[in-house]
Image (tube, grey):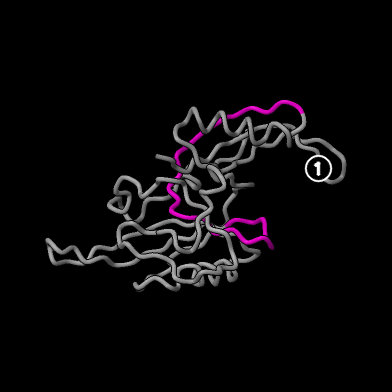
């Protein structure tokens, strides 16, 4: 089963003014294990980063789906919640899921998540949107770029109905979520926020 991992990489980067600076940047990729994630980041970045680079951290990341649009390279993390009826207890339970979407502004990110999830047969709320430090995302393989017909929520067993989305959806193949993460506390933060809030020394 594949999951999303955030991999933090440190290397010497050439800036636009020609100077060099030591930076630490997070990338996201789908992989089977931590070891697989480390091997893949070396494979993906080996040809694009000049000189040596060092993997300084790998964290499993709680992201349900990723919506990529070609007109932006900035990522926003969007927290979406909805109510699910517990048939056994006959009570409603609030479920929260995290999504990433590429957009230039918070407003555009909000509109794109609304568009991407709009065909679901449930009422949902976008409760938070925050800029993400993610530099680039590597799906597991080409077939892992989901079509609108791919399930985005195994819990409610709904599918996308729009056959021609404007963005691309990335899902970690086999991550059919993934271990009851919806039962975790609603206020828990994603791995992105937990692992990249401290400044580099």
Residue visible at 69% across and 37% down?
A: 23
First to last magenta residue range: 51-75
Q: Nearer the viewer, residue 113 or 187?
A: 113
- Residue 155 appearing in the image: yes
On screen, residue 106 versus residue 161, left or right, reads right
Residue 123 vertical position relative to residue 182 in the rendered view, above or below: below
- The answer to whether residue 66 is magenta is yes
Residue 67 vertical position relative to residue 181 in the rendered view, above or below: below
Residue visible at 76% across and 27% down?
A: 51
Where does the image place residue 122, in percent across and percent down from the top left?
34, 72
Quadrant assignment, res 55: top right
Q: Nearer the viewer, residue 107 or 144?
A: 144
- The answer to whether residue 191 is magenta is no
On screen, residue 198 versus residue 155, left or right, reads right
Where does the image place residue 112, in percent across and percent down from the top left?
55, 69
Circle 1 residue: 15
């Amino acid at each position: 089963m594949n999951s999303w991992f955030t991999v933090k990489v440190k290397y010497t980067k050439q800036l636009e003014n020609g100077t060099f600076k030591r930076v630490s940047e997070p990338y996201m990729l789908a992989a089977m294990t931590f070891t697989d994630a480390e091997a893949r980041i070396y494979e993906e970045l080996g040809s694009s980063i000049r000189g040596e680079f060092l993997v300084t951290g790998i964290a499993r990341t709680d992201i349900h789906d990723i919506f990529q649009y070609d007109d932006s390279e900035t990522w926003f993390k969007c927290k979406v919640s909805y109510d699910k009826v517990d048939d056994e207890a006959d009570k409603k339970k609030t479920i929260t899921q995290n999504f990433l979407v590429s957009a230039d502004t918070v407003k555009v990110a909000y509109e794109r998540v609304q568009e991407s999830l709009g065909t679901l047969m449930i009422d949902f709320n976008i409760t938070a949107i925050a800029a993400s430090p993610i530099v680039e995302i590597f799906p597991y393989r080409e077939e892992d770029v989901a079509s609108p017909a791919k399930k985005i929520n195994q819990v409610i067993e709904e599918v996308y109905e729009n056959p021609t989305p404007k963005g691309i959806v990335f899902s970690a193949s086999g991550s059919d979520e993934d271990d009851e993460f919806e039962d975790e506390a609603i206020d828990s933060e994603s791995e992105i926020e937990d692992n990249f809030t401290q400044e580099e020394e």
